[in-house]
Amino acid sequence: MSGLPPLSGSRRLFWAGVGRIAANAPLLPAWERRDQKALAPRCPEALIRSTVLLSDAHAILRNMHQPHAVQVSGALFLAFGQACVNLHFYIDDEAKALFKDLRPEEWYPLENFEDVLRVVAARYSDPAPILEQVGIEMMKFWYEVGPGKQHVKRGTDFLRFQTSSEGYYSVIRGDPARIGDFTLVDLNEKEGTAVVRSTTPFDKDMERGVLRGGMALTQDLFYIDIDNSADVNTYQIEFH
C-alpha cells in the first residue's frame, strides 16, 4: 500500500511472522480433523446468540470485496482461525465458510475480522480470557511453525520487536489515523518492567494474549504480568 514504510526483515513484528506462516498452513484439513472434538456452546442462550451471528456469515462474505477505509490481510484471518482450531472451539459450517474462501495474499475489510471476533466472543459470558488465550495460541503457532525461533531467544527479545510498527503494518492498511500503531515505549530489563502502547483497532484482550504468549515462548521468564486495566491502550508489563 502506498504511504506505508518498507519492511525490514529483522524488525518485523509477530504480525509479519503470522503473515509468512499462514500462507503455508493447511487450515481447512484441521477443521475436519477437530470437528469431532469441538466444544459446543455452554448454554442455550449462547447457542441462540451465536446462531444469530453465524446467520450473518453470507452477508459478511458479500461484504468482503467492497471498498473499505481499513483492510487486514487474509493471513491474519487464517492465523486467527488456526488458533481457534488449536483451542477446539466449536465452528459452525457458515463460520468455516468465512475462512474457506480467504487467501493470505488478499486484503479484507477490518469489519469482517471484527465480525469473526464477535462470533467467538458471543459464545461466552466473559470472552476476555478466551480472546487472550487466542492471542497466546497465535504466538505459539508463530514460534513453532513460523520464523519465531530465529528472532526470539529470550522473552525480552519479543518485547524488543515492538520498538516500531513496521511489522504491524504488514497485516493492516488504510487511513493511518484509523490503523494506529503497536509500540514498545519503555523497557527496563534490570527492573523487569516494560510499557507497550497500542492504538490499533484490534481487540485488547487478544493483544494482551499476544504479549503474554510472545514473552513466554522461550520459557526463560518465570513471572509475566500484563495489566491494561488503568488504560486499555497501555500495557504495563512486569517480568522476572
Image (spheres, rainbow, N blue to C red):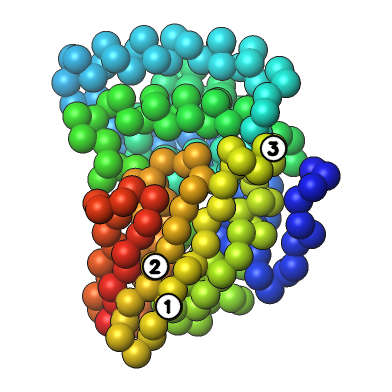
> Which circle marks residue 174 in the picture?
3
Instruction: Identify residue for label 2.
Output: 195
> Which circle marks residue 170 in the picture?
none
The image shows residue 192 at horizontal and vertical percentages of 31, 82
What is the quadrant of residue 13 in the picture? bottom right
The image shows residue 6 at horizontal and vertical percentages of 79, 59
User: Pointer 1 and pointer 2: residues touching (CB < 8 Å)?
Assistant: yes
* Residue found at the far right of this picture: 2
- Towards the viewer: 32 or 174: 174
User: Pointer 3 and pointer 1: residues touching (CB < 8 Å)?
Assistant: no
Q: Residues within 10 Å of mark 3 (few under 14, many from 20)?
A: some
- Report the number of numbered marks: 3
* Residue found at the far front of this picture: 177
The image shows residue 233 at horizontal and vertical percentages of 39, 50
What is the quadrant of residue 101 in the picture? top right
Q: Where, quadrant-wise, is the C terminus in this rendering? A: bottom left
Mark-to-mark CA distance, 3 and 2: 26 Å
Q: In what element is the residue under mark 3?
A: strand
Q: Earlier in the sequence, mark 3 or mark 1?
A: 3
Amino acid type for the residue under numbered disc 1: Leu
Q: Earlier in the sequence, mark 1 or mark 2?
A: 1
Q: Residue at x 35, y 12 (%)?
A: 51
- Towards the viewer: 92 or 20: 20
Q: In what element is the residue under mark 2?
A: strand
Q: Is residue 68 left or right of residue 188?
A: right
Instruction: Identify residue for label 1.
Output: 187
Q: Residue at x 44, y 74 (%)?
A: 186
